[in-house]
Image: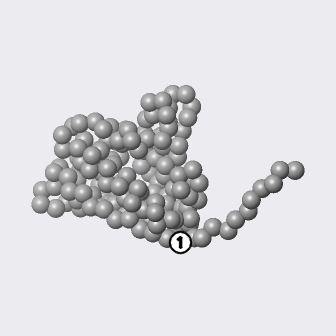
Amino acid sequence: MTATAAKILDASAARIELEVTIEAPPAKVWQAIIDEPDSWWVSGLRCVPGGSEVVLDARAGGHLVEHNDSGGSLLWFTVIAVEPQRSINMAGALAPPFGGPCHTFLLIELEERGGGTVVKMTNSLHGHVDEAMLPDIHGGWKHLLEDGLKRFVEGGTRA
């Protein structure tokens, strides 16, 4: 018989909040988030090798999925609530290879402000959350929203 290890992991919670202002009306930002995630999902944050595509089915029970033509795939989130043109709520899991196990909840809200749109992102995590992983998660969301979404919506430049 092969020896195995069993270990109790500490559980904790964390919340990451970001705001990014995009010089475009909320309808245009919403369309990019919902209909065109593959256009702004930066390559450095893709986890499925081999030319993956990111797709969002934006209705309760729908999914944010990354997949490739070889059959590889990753379920990023399951959609739990949508208020069209205003917010989308999703729930997911962070597996051990990515720092978990933990549950992750994502809320993206849009607010019209001064002719542009403020995108408010809240990522809440519960489970095996190590403080050392938070800067990477925060940096990833910042990179995705600023260098991906903002750049795509304002300039039409694909990530």
Residue depicted at 18% across the width and 44% down the height: 154
- Going 47% across and 54% down the picture, which residue do you hit? 79
Question: Tag count in the figure?
Answer: 1
Residue 137 in the image, given as x and y percentages of width and height:
41, 57
Q: Position of residue 89 (x, y in %)?
A: 42, 59
Q: Quadrant of the C terminus?
A: top left
Residue at 42 percent of width and 62 percent of height: 134
Q: In the rendered image, which quarter is residue 53 located in?
A: top left
- Tag 1: Cα neighbours inside 10 Å, few (<14), some, or many (≥20)? few
- The residue positioned farthest toward the front in the image shown: 3
Question: In the drawing, does residue 12 fall left or right of residue 7?
Answer: left
- Give residue 67's position: percent from left, percent from top: 50, 36
Q: In the image, what residue type sits under mark 1?
A: Ser
Give the x, y percent position of residue 131.
46, 66
Label 1: element kind: strand
| Residue at the right extreme of this rendering | 1
Q: Say left or right for 22 vs 43.
A: left
In the rendered image, is residue 83 in sight? no
For residue 32, what is the image quadrant? Answer: top left
Residue sitting at 67 percent across and 68 percent down? 8
State whether residue 97 appears in this view. yes
